Every structure is written in structure tokens, then in C-alpha cells.
Amino acid sequence: MFESLSVLDQVTINFSAAGTHLVNSILALIMFGVALDIRLGVFKEVLVKPKALITGLVSQLILLPVVTFLLIIIFHKWLTPTVSMGMILVSACPGGNISNFMTNLAKGKTELSVSMTAVNTAIAIFMTPLIFKIYGGLYVDYMAKASDNLLQPIFIPLGQMFYTIFILLGIPLTLGLLCTHFFPKFSKKISPTFRKASMALFLLIVVMAFSNNFDLFLKHIQWIFLIVLIHNGMALLTGFSFASLLRVNRKERRAITIETGIQNSGLGLALLFNPKIFPPEMAIGGMLFITAWWGIWHIVSGLGLSYSWSKKPLD
């Protein structure tokens, strides 16, 4: 398996400046659409009783990166450096933009899901670079050095990641919240359109990610599929187990589970396409394929789990 995946560590991302700007614009539009669904009123109950929100944030921001790194340690003999770094990048991203819909379908607490999405997205400006820096640094310092397959050192530019995420998440989210606050009727009217368009736009990002190396992806899909399957499964299990351990109610448990397992891999792809963070000459094929396939698979797993829960009573 390692020998098979090692070829991905030699793949560079061939992406034009125009393509990079398009991906960034798409992600910004998606995040603007996410903000259109956020009403300040939904925070009241969650903030009055913050246990579930704190539980969810700990699950996603602390436990998921830890569990990811433990998976990398356990399976390090079979994982290549760029595949491992791709798993770390995904775990560092905030919740995905479709988690609120999935929580609603699953009869979970939608208010909690929306609150987690809003808070996670807002603090991702700081947390995503920090998490990637910490665990990516640990991997490079203590694990990748032992591998002859690390073709080049991986430098993690914390400042540039912070700046990029602020532009891609912070500004669109702020504009969306302002639109919702000052033009509530207009926001409510266009929100469904943005929600539907977000799915199509995200899939466009994934297609663009695979376009130059699709044959290579098909060749290694079985291993990429297995890695993401295990990683995403552990993310969902982490959210469910931690929420159960802290004894939040079932609606809240479903929301936390879904939020922990649905990551904004579109942000991960946007970071990978940024030449100031990952220079074009850097071979990071494993990161690209893991991040892009996660974006497809978490839709399948999230919808499957949500539909299953929708058929089960809460009591």
C-alpha cells in the first residue's frame, strides 16, 4: 500500500492563477451563503445552556485533530507523508457548509449545528492555521524524518494561512451576517438558492482538483477511499462518543456527531491551490486527493447517517 501511494508524493498541483482565483471566489460565495442561514436568535438557547456547544467545539477542535494524529501514528507504515499531511489538513478545517441541512434531516438540534458552524467558521481564521501548524509540525519533526519518501521539507507558513482564511472565510461570513441583519427578508429569499448552488459550486471545486490527475486518482482510488472511510468514520464516532460521554441529549448528540464528521474540505482545497502556502513545485498529491475525496465522501456518509437517524425516534 505504501509503495502504491508513494507515487502521490511526487505529484505537483498544476493550477493557473485564474483557476486559483475561481476556487477562492467559489468558496467565498459558499461561505456568504452559509451566513445567510445564521440568525442571531438561534444563539440564545445555546448560549444560555452552553454545555452542548462547548462539547461540540471540544470534539471538533481538539479531539478530532488528536484522533487524526493517532490514526497516522497507528498506520504510519502504510501512509505516505503527503497523505498524512492531507489528513491533518482536513482535521484542521471548520465544519462543512451542509452540516446544518444534515442535522435538520437527522432530527438533531439545528440551532446547535448552526451555532457550531458559525463559531467554528469564525475562529477558523486562527484555529485552522494553528492546528495544522501544531500537528503538521509534529509529523514533520518526529515522523517524516524517518521516511526516505519525504521528497522535500514541508514548511507551514502560519501567517499566510491566517491571511488567506481571513479573506476566504472572515470577510464573506461578516458580509453575510450584515446582509442577514440589515436585509432579513432579502436574505431569507435568496438563502435557498445559495444553499442549492453551494453544493454544485463545491463539486466544481472538486472536479477542478481532480482534472489534471484524474487517471492517477482512479489508479489509487481504492486506498484513498479506504483511508478517508476510516478517517471520516472515526470523526463521526468521536463526536458521537464524546457527546454520549458528557450526556448531552439525543438531539444535541446528533448535531455534534454530524458537525464533527463534516469538514469544510473546500477550504482545504483553496489552501492547497494557494501558491504562497504550497508553492507549485511542491509535490503534495496525497494532500490533494485526500482532501478532495473527503469532500465527496462526507456528503455520502453524512446523508446516509442523517437519513438513518431520521427514521429513528428520539425517545
Image (tube, helix red, strand yellow):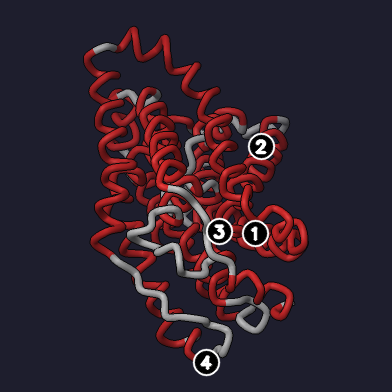
Identified at 43% across, 37% down, the residue is: 22
Q: Which mark is residue 146?
A: 4
Identified at 60% across, 76% down, the residue is: 80
Q: Quadrant of the N terminus?
A: bottom right
Badge 4 amino acid: Ala
Q: Secondary structure at mark 1?
A: helix
Image location (x, y in percent) of residue 171: 26, 36
User: For mark 3, what is the residue?
Assistant: 288
Identified at 44% across, 53% down, the residue is: 273
Judge depth for marks 2 and 3 and give the one in front: 3
Judge depth for marks 3 and 1 and give the one in front: 3
Identified at 48% across, 45% down, the residue is: 266
What is the C-alpha distance between the residues marked 1 and 4?
Answer: 24 Å
Question: Considering only order in the chain, which callout, 4 or 1, is on the residue closer to the N terminus?
Answer: 4
Judge depth for marks 4 and 2 and give the one in front: 4
Q: Which mark is residue 303?
A: 2
Image location (x, y in percent) of residue 159: 23, 61
